[in-house]
Amino acid sequence: MEGWIKLHRIITEWEWYDDSNTFRLFIHLLLKANSKDAIWRGEPIKRGQMITSIAHLSEELKLSVKQIRISINKLKRTNEVTSARANNATRLTINKYDSYQAKPNEEGQTKRQREDKEGANEGQTKGDKQELKKEKNNVSVVFDAFRLSFPGTKRGLKTELEAFLKKNDSEIIFLLLPALEREKSHRAKLAELKEFVPPWKNLSTWIDRKCWEQEFETTPESQKPQSKTPKEWL
């Protein structure tokens, strides 16, 4: 007998894996079963089948006849094998033989499917990289618009952006410019009311203190400058 069989590691999760006699018998059947259809003494033996006997298996595996019977019954109970009489012997069939041992053309097909899947994954990866690059470009453009609008002291785009991304998520960048405009509007109102307007922080400090989260109180109507009537001008 020539050739080899394939054995997937998932067999370690099989319910009979820790049953030494049953596991040993099943592996023996995989090794001895026909890998292609044949004829034996006028009896057709299909792929995944073998002609044997309890006594012969007992002799080959050095297990008692009782142990062989018990293990075969276990395998039959979980639908791993079926048995039938064949002249003066027993025909054992491994029910999912093709699942355990793929045919050569199926192996080629499986390989092609795997290659197609890898190609699709590679294409998807390239697409993901392009989207990521596009997103990074958008983030850079939006952050630079914020940086250029910031009135305080600031450094170059690359330095400021890298420092920001080390501590914050990129999604926050889209909140910066609207927050800056709100602060500018608030400062303008303070100046209109002739109230103290603090100097601008430098950009890195503004970011470290998460100033985009600050909220500004609405200026009360009583504090708003009143326009004079013509009578008051006199």
Image (cartoon, rainbow, N blue to C red):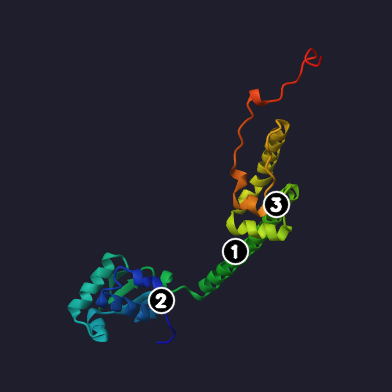
Number of disc labels: 3
Between 189 and 83, the one lying in front of the other is: 189
Point out which mark residue 18 bears.
none
Q: Residues within 10 Å of mark 1 (few under 14, many from 20)?
A: few
The residue under label 3 is which amino acid type? Phe
Kindly identify which residue carries mark 2: 7
Rendered view: 18 above or below 189: below
Residue contact at pointers 3 and 2, CB within 8 angstroms: no
Whether residue 231 is visible: yes
| Distance from Cα at disc 3 to Cα at disc 2 | 56 Å
Residue 77, given in percent of the width and then of the height, sits at: 26, 65
| Distance from Cα at disc 3 to Cα at disc 1 | 32 Å
Between 80 and 178, the one lying in front of the other is: 178
Dividing the picture into quadrants, the one containing residue 115 is bottom right
Kindly identify which residue carries mark 3: 143
- Left or right: 173 in relation to 65: right
Residue contact at pointers 3 and 1, CB within 8 angstroms: no
- SS for tag 1? helix
- SS for tag 3? helix
Residue 31, given in percent of the width and then of the height, sits at: 37, 81
Kindly identify which residue carries mark 1: 121
User: Residue at point 21% right, 73% down?
Assistant: 70
Between 165 and 40, the one lying in front of the other is: 165
| Distance from Cα at disc 2 to Cα at disc 1 | 27 Å
The residue under label 2 is which amino acid type? Leu
Sequence-earlier tag: 2 or 1: 2
Residue 227, given in percent of the width and then of the height, sits at: 75, 20
